[in-house]
Amino acid sequence: MSSRIVDAPDPAAVAHTGLVILDGIGLGVADVVRLADGSARPVPGTDAMKRVAESWDAARQIAATGRVYGRSTGVGANRNEDVPTEAAAEHGLRLLRSHAGAIGEELPARQVRAMLAVRANQLLAGGAGLRPTVVTALCEALENGAHPVVNEFGSVGTGDIAALAQAGLALAGEHPWRETGSGGAGSAGRDTGSGSVGGWDAGSGGAGGGRWDTESAGVGGPGVALGGVSSSASRHPEPRRSASGAPEPQPLDNNDALAFISSNALTLGQAALALHELRGLVEATQVVAALSLLAVDGSHEAYAAPVHAARRHRGSAEVARRMRQLIGAEDRPTPPLGRIQDPYGFRCLPQIHGPAHDAADALEEVLAIEINAAAENPLISPEDMAAYHHGGFYQAQLALALDHFRLALTQVARLSTSRLSTLNEPAFTRLRPFLADPEPASSGVMILEYAAGAALGDLRAFSAPASLGHAVLSRGVEEQASFASLAARQTLRACGAYRLVVGCELVAAVRALRQRDLRPEPGLPVGRALELAETVLAEDPADRPLTGDVTAAAALLDRFTDIWRGSEA
């Protein structure tokens, strides 16, 4: 088996060799993304593997001498039904087979790989009590570019049991694998599902987590049929029981089945992918806003240090400080000579962007706990030689944090549309309405307000709180659900819509700066942003379709994230 087990190496060595050490303690969101993208390979730590082995030994002893949920009993409403000893081994496979009923679109490789990475790390926390070879098999699949076929729907936020049962059956050799790269730390493959809008590939079923495709500006993709149902054959390689990168089949039994599927690893992986992308986009949005501020001769007073020292919200103060760095403003700027104050799109930017940063931080804290948690039910404790039955799989914290983040994100996007409207006003730009060319009645960028408003409508719909959902399942014994799984999918879906909204503002801001012949100092971050934008956005102000401009601007936002992060004082 190719996945090595190592002691934790020097962090600098890890960064240079493209390794991610899985230890059940310190895996972060960025690590999950690297593993999902195939830009790093996983290595289970020595001490963590010892924990897994101790938990496995303890679990078998406990199950042999007492009743343990899912090992010597049924699950859900069947929890009081004992499994005879002679049927125990087959019980595990029957449990996987019966629960591997996820439905809907096949998920993109990137999301499934994120799930595998999270699940491997959680198992290394040492509370599941399943055979150690499962961990090395998961790492081998990640390293070799193989992932099991997993479908979209099957969880209500109390465990991704359907998706993980599909993965469990694949590990047992009864469910297909797909090959998603050339192996090693190579590519995880581009997500190419239905839902490709304006170059953004939102992944299978519109669930997001894809990449921005600057070569595609069409709506929909291969295999899209009426009603949004797409042909898997046109979007995925042929599944195989034993793909070249798939691990050897594992002899899973009653001591492995529930222990493997008792997790929210898919939801957590999807949430990590969404947070990583959207946090970067919120940062990039401030760079776009800085360009818009220059285009309308905006005041620097809203970002003055004394304003935010008087109202000490961490996120807002940091946004104001970054804006001063981006545009080269003083901590205590002088009042403007023109209008006394700006529209909310500029004046309230710290108060609206700040909470989005705070919400991202709060979500990342929840993910850091859950990605490294031994949350399986029951929890196997080798120290106590006990199996503790509990509700640690219930993802209320994650659902609420995701809902909070999406709501904050929508406020930021809405502010972008406000600035877009301001850029269309001659009173602020001293230009023609809609930044039009001199031809009579030219429309300029008028349509961008409609396009951004439409994308914002989707974003607003995706921001409906998933945690308001409710379900009573399994004959009433599971009478509550967090719907964190829906919250994660909705957060992924928000990525493409958000990106398009801000792309519309960027197109208008660059056009306004060009028409006014305003050039920020090249040494300033905002100056570098304008230079970068001018390399990809056409200068022609004539009335013409702007789809390609917005697509290019939306793709550019990832590089604006780098500019924002480089603006650290």
Image: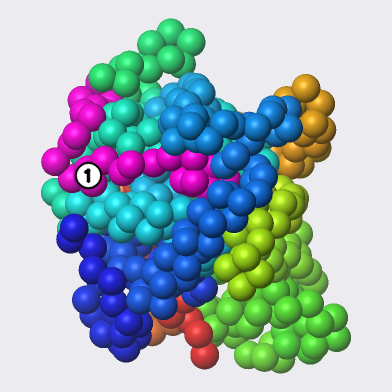
Q: Is residue 183 above or below residue 81?
A: below
In this rendering, position of residue 184 left or right of residue 386: left
Which residue is drawn at the image coordinates 44% and 36% (left, top)? 89
Q: For mark 1, what is the residue?
A: 248
Q: Main secondary structure of the magenta part?
A: loop
Q: Is residue 547 visible?
A: no
**Residue 90 at x, y percent in the picture:** 44, 30
Which residue is drawn at the image coordinates 73% and 79% (left, top)? 314
Q: How many dots with numbers?
A: 1
| Residue range corresponding to the magenta coloring | 234-263
Which residue is drawn at the image coordinates 25% and 35% (left, top)? 178
Q: Is residue 476 visible?
A: yes
Q: Is residue 251 magenta?
A: yes
Question: Which type of secondary structure does the marked residue at label 1 adopt?
Answer: loop
In this rendering, position of residue 23 left or right of residue 368: left
Q: List the single residue furthest toward the right.
A: 310
